[in-house]
């Protein structure tokens, strides 16, 4: 049996996979066993942010793998402590908790919020508000705050005391807000929901509501964090909207499984020993990779490159939009971009795959472009040329 047949026979069928087996990756490109070359504009869904097999990451992982793999969080770890120091210094947060994924990071943030709400005998302060069309994960708590019925319906009943507001509609949040709310969770840019950035006024208004009702503001930066929008975290681009807790994962360790949530002064002492844990969270090998990611960011000036090259991509997409009315909208920030089209996103993803370009859909009519942050203009041109050929056939 080949790889596709084995996968179909032995692995639980929870993914609709494309019929491609990638055997190797280098930079922004993926290769099949037969040597076919594909430009990766999905980055494993916003994960391989420095491309495939970046030499600095390979070196860091090899050195750590030859030294120490795992001890558990019952002991101290130098790579983890170094990583925490770098992240705290870079973000202005007070402390960080390391885990293995975005869902776990959000799960921890929600647990923290519930415990925060119950301080000082406030047994009814348990409500959580999230946004329609959000995506926060697939655990029972995170699928509950993921306000999309298609992800929730098979798993009813869900977590109690969770309420849904309209994204970018402050009145919708106000109508749900009271002193029994312990937290509001939202994405500064909704990724899976169709690439919708939050407005500054909306985030500032939610921040003010949380302050008024002593609720935590949680930002889910699993997809929009780690440099993808041109700043280390997306919320850094908004003034007066600082969260109490924010989460990240995906690109944090450049392709290895790592998530984290960050806390401020108000929330740094809520969780105590025994309240939360992760066996593999902050594993030394993964932490070594994440340290290397941050070092490369500084050495190669990645954030400036994101701003420059994403601007080029967006302006070029707008020129295509002027030529082809198949493009209804272009949205996003940095290299978290989406184009809304007038036909099926799944169909465009397949058409691009035929042109050896890997992309990711977001809902029914939006295709996301989430390339490695190291992508160059000549590689972006490959995408633009493919889109031109595809759309030309539809006119």
Image (spheres, helix red, strand yellow):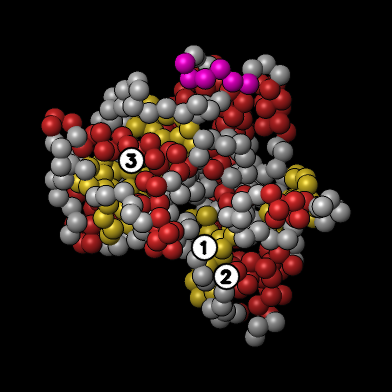
User: Pointer 3: what residue?
Assistant: 110
Residue 72 lies in the magenta-colored region:
yes
Question: Of helix, strand and loop, which one carries label 3?
Answer: helix
User: Pointer 1: what residue?
Assistant: 362
Q: Is mark 1 in CB contact (under 8 Å) with mark 2?
A: yes
Main SS, magenta region, reads loop
Q: Is mark 3 in CB contact (under 8 Å) with mark 2?
A: no
Q: Is mark 1 in CB contact (under 8 Å) with mark 3?
A: no
- Specify the farthest residue to the bottom: 395
Q: Position of residue 127 (x, y in %)?
A: 22, 47
Q: Is residue 157 left or right of residue 122?
A: right
Q: Is residue 227 above or below residue 390?
A: above
Tell me if residue 93 can be seen. Answer: no
- Specify the farthest residue to the top: 75
Question: Of helix, strand and loop, which one carries label 2?
Answer: helix
Instruction: Please tell me which residue is depicted at 65% across the width and 85% down the height of the picture.
Output: 395
User: Pointer 2: what residue?
Assistant: 345
C-alpha distance separating marks 1 and 3: 25 Å
Number of numbered labels in the structure image: 3
Q: Quadrant of residue 321?
A: bottom right
Question: Of helix, strand and loop, which one carries label 1?
Answer: strand
Question: What are the residue bounds of the magenta stretch?
Answer: 69-74
């Amino acid at each position: 049996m080949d790889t596709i047949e084995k996968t179909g026979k032995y692995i639980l069928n929870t993914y609709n996979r494309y019929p491609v087996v990638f055997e190797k990756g280098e930079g922004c490109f993926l290769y099949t066993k037969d040597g076919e070359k594909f430009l990766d504009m999905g980055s494993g869904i916003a994960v391989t942010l420095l491309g495939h097999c970046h030499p600095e990451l390979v070196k860091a992982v090899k050195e750590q793998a030859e030294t120490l793999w795992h001890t558990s969080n019952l002991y101290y770890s130098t790579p983890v402590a170094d990583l925490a120091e770098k992240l705290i210094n870079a973000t202005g947060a007070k402390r960080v908790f390391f885990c293995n994924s975005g869902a776990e990071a959000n799960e921890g943030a929600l647990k923290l919020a519930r415990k925060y709400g119950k301080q000082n005998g406030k047994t009814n302060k348990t409500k959580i508000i999230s946004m329609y069309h959000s995506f926060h994960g697939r655990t029972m708590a995170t699928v509950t705050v993921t306000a999309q019925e298609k992800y929730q319906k098979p798993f009813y009943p869900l977590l109690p005391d969770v309420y849904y507001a309209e994204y970018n509609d402050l009145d919708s949040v106000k109508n749900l807000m009271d002193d029994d709310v312990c937290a509001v969770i939202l994405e500064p840019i909704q990724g899976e929901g169709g690439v919708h950035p939050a407005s500054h006024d909306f985030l500032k208004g939610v921040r003010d509501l949380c302050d008024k009702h002593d609720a935590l503001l949680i930002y889910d930066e699993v997809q929009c964090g780690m440099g993808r929008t041109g700043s280390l975290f997306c919320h850094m681009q908004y003034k007066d909207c600082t969260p109490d807790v924010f989460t990240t994962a995906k690109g944090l360790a450049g392709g290895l499984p790592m998530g984290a949530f960050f806390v401020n002064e108000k929330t740094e002492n809520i969780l105590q020993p025994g309240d939360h844990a992760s066996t593999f969270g902050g594993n030394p090998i993964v932490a070594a990779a994440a340290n290397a990611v941050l070092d490369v960011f500084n050495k190669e000036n990645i954030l400036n490159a994101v701003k420059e090259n994403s601007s080029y991509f967006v302006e070029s997409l707008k020129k295509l939009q002027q030529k082809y009315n198949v493009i209804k909208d272009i949205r996003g920030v940095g290299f978290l971009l989406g184009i809304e089209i007038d036909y099926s996103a799944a169909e465009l993803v397949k058409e691009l795959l035929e042109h050896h370009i890997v992309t990711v859909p977001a809902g029914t009519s939006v295709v996301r472009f989430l390339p490695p942050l190291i992508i160059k203009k000549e590689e972006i041109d490959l995408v633009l040329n493919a889109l031109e050929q595809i759309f030309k056939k539809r006119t």
